Amino acid sequence: MGEQLSICQAALHVLSTSDAREKAAIARETAKLWKAGHFTGRERAFPEDRPARPEKPELLFPKDMPKRGRGGSLENRIALMHAIAHIELNAIDLAWDIVARFGHDMPEDFINDWVEVGDDEARHFMLIEQRLEDLGTFYGELPAHDGLWQAAHDTRNDLAARLAIVPLVLEARGLDVTPGMVKRMENFGDSKSASALKVIYDEEISHVAKGQKWFSWLCEQKGWNGQEKYQELVKKYFSGKLKPPFNKKARKAAGLLESYYLPLSAI
């Protein structure tokens, strides 16, 4: 990696690493090198349709995933944290894919933002993986669903669509559901898991904000009405309606306007 001078090419190294721990470590090191000014170029990179993945966990269709209980048993808490670890691993690749795939002709601040997101997601994965170890297990022991990369694949040729769907639908959904997970963990007496989820929640607000920032920038460059374009793209690329209840306070903090998402909800 030390000889790579293009940040887009360096992002490919993250995406092509199959081992989950190694992927997270390379993501963090690449972010460090970018911030230190190591990568001077941004020659276009061409990521594979799917990033490299470890042999485990077994990937299943969402409909085939075992039902997860909602009680506070160790088994249920492990299942929830394992699912979060899988989401964070995908989030590492989502952030670095947007750098590799779209960074070559965007402002440098765009790369700054998504490298920072990629660094955050790698740290989040490490945090949850450590929590799994504390609970006596590891990432990969349970099956995980294989639907998380579909949004990236569907939007691989359209930056506006990628921004609309990944940060402004999927990550925004995380803002809606994570506070409930934190409360559940607190009620179960698992303060360490609750604290880890709080860290993720607080930083995900900034990730949604970056998505909104660059979606708005792109709409301005193209002369699009942001609200109309967002709704058009979500209808095209997202299956189903957006599900309330929404965490309007967190979404507002991220700059995501109710006029964007409420008309698309199941209300």
Image (cartoon, grey):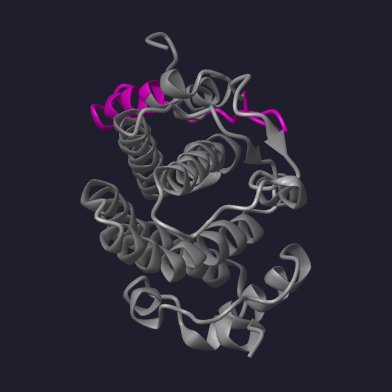
Front residue (pair 27, 174): 174
Q: Decide: is 24 above or below 61.
A: above
Give the image location of residue 156, x and y in percent.
70, 45
Q: Decide: is 212 above or below 40.
A: below
- Magenta residues, as a range? 25-52
Front residue (pair 260, 264): 264
Quarter placement of the N terminus: top left
Residue farthest to the top?
3
Give the image location of residue 109, x and y in percent.
36, 49
- In-image side of 231 versus 11 (left or right): right
Query: In the rendered picture of this protein, how many numbered marks are placed on residues?
Result: 0
- In-image side of 219 versus 182 (left or right): right
Whether residue 198 can be seen here: yes
Q: Quadrant of residue 256?
A: bottom left
Q: Residue at x 37, y 34 (%)?
A: 132
Q: Residue at x 56, y 59 (%)?
A: 163
Q: Decide: is 39 above or below 4.
A: below
Residue 245 within the segment the image draws in magenta = no
Front residue (pair 138, 175): 138
Majority secondary structure in the magenta region: loop
Whether residue 39 can be seen here: no
Give the image location of residue 125, x and y in percent.
39, 36
Quarter placement of the C terminus: bottom right
Q: Residue at x 61, y 61 (%)?
A: 165
Residue 31 within the segment the image draws in magenta = yes
Front residue (pair 146, 224): 146
Give the image location of residue 148, x and y in percent.
64, 47
